[in-house]
Amino acid sequence: MTPKEHTMTTAYTPDLSIITDEIHPAVGPWELPVFLEEHELPSRAGDRVIQFREALREAMSEEMRRDQRVFLLGEEVAQYNGAYKVSQGMLDEFGEKRIIDTPISENGFAGMAIGAAMMGLRPIVEFMSWSFSLVAADPILNNAPKMLYMSGGQWGCPIVFRGNDGAGGQLGSTHSWCVEGLFSNVPGMKMVIPSNPYDAKGLLKTAIRDPDPVFFLESERMLGDRAHVPEEEYYIPFGRARLMREGDACTLVSWGRPVHFCMEAAEALAADGVECDVLDMRTIRPLDIDSIVASIQKTGRVVVVDQSWPFGSVASETVTQICEHAFDWLDAPPMRVNTRDVPTPYAKGLEAVYLPNAGRIVEAVMEIAR
């Protein structure tokens, strides 16, 4: 061989022509919904009061009528109408090819759904509990969020994983996981944690339309919560917090069920003349740090309330970002209120003390508001 034949290039130049705006060339570009400003959304006041579970059902049904690629699969979602009756009646409307009962094998049906998403379908995977998703850690954490990156933009994974997260009421430690602190560490996915039926519907519709993997965390304890949910279509964008209550003494930041604990604490504090901003983050991937900073510029103090364990929690990351972006406006150290750093207790009284309840939030606010 000649020396020329032994010549090796020192760098690889990728062919960028294969990367387009279309994640799946076979199905065309994504048609993302139109997002309105918060004040332009349909009113939250009204008499069309439905349960949290019904709001989730409406979101899925509306998107399944709009897009034939959307389907639901999971344990007992079809014949039994859902373990928590979220999918009640959907089998009758959409049939067994789009409402699919699976074996008790989260690893199997999650992996199958990821393959379907890669080929252009839009699966919604229901975990009866996010505690059970741990056996599907490889497909949902090591494959779905990384697919777009590892394929150089050629293969995405438009999929929604949803189910109950957190203490469900005396279910013991192994069935009470709050997975947000563990799972949100992974780049390439989005995480949604709604606190009320109105937001749950708007956010789930957005999740189903999103081109990325979305982890949608619900709460068994909130499925029966009732609120007005309008009939007209609406979508709530990710990364936009909602100001639930206004004050100037302290900012309370939370998401999901603990938002209700924050509102309860804010009411108690107001009776003593301490008025708080309460921010419902709604999503933590992405996290609306700008809204937190804007509130701290007014209050000078912040308490982050998180139902996951304190070490390496979402609250820890939120406090870090606060220190990075709002340090000059802080008049006191940021505070966290997490669940206690122990396995979730079974006893009802112990579980109540374990959670970030209103009493502990009031104590944290008073400690930095002196």
Image (tube, helix red, strand yellow):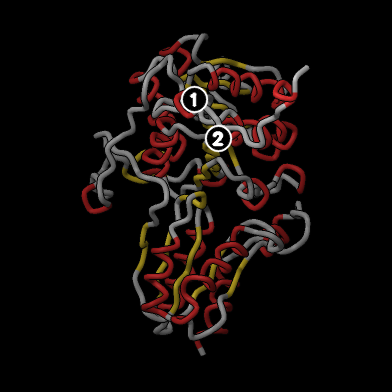
Question: For the residue marked with disc 2, what is the amino acid?
Answer: Arg
Q: Which residue is more in the foreground, 8 or 299?
A: 8
Q: Earlier in the sequence, mark 1 or mark 2?
A: 1
Residue 223, given in percent of the width and then of the height, sits at 50, 41
Residue 351, given in percent of the width and then of the height, sits at 70, 57
Q: Specify whether 84 is left or right of 7.
A: left
Mark 1 and mark 2 in contact? Answer it, CB < 8 Å: no
Q: Secondary structure at mark 2?
A: strand
Q: Residue at x 35, y 18 (%)?
A: 65
Q: Which residue has dot 1 on it?
A: 87
For the question of whether residue 168 can be seen, the reply is no
Eye-nearest disc, 1 or 2: 2
Residue 129, given in percent of the width and then of the height, sits at 65, 36
Q: Which residue is more in the foreground, 96 or 143?
A: 143
Give the residue furthest to the bottom. 370
What is the tally of numbered marks visible in this picture?
2
Q: Residue at x 64, y 25 (%)?
A: 110
How packed mark 1 is, by other alpha carbons closer than 10 Å (few <14, some 14-19, many 20 or more), is many
How packed mark 2 is, by other alpha carbons closer than 10 Å (few <14, some 14-19, many 20 or more), is many
Question: For the residue marked with disc 1, what is the amino acid?
Answer: Ser
For the question of whether residue 322 can be seen, the reply is yes
Q: Secondary structure at mark 1?
A: loop
Q: Which residue is more in the foreground, 335 or 138?
A: 138
Q: Residue at x 27, y 34 (%)?
A: 233
* Marking on residue 162: 2
Q: Residue at x 46, y 47 (%)?
A: 194
Residue 317, given in percent of the width and then of the height, sits at 59, 62
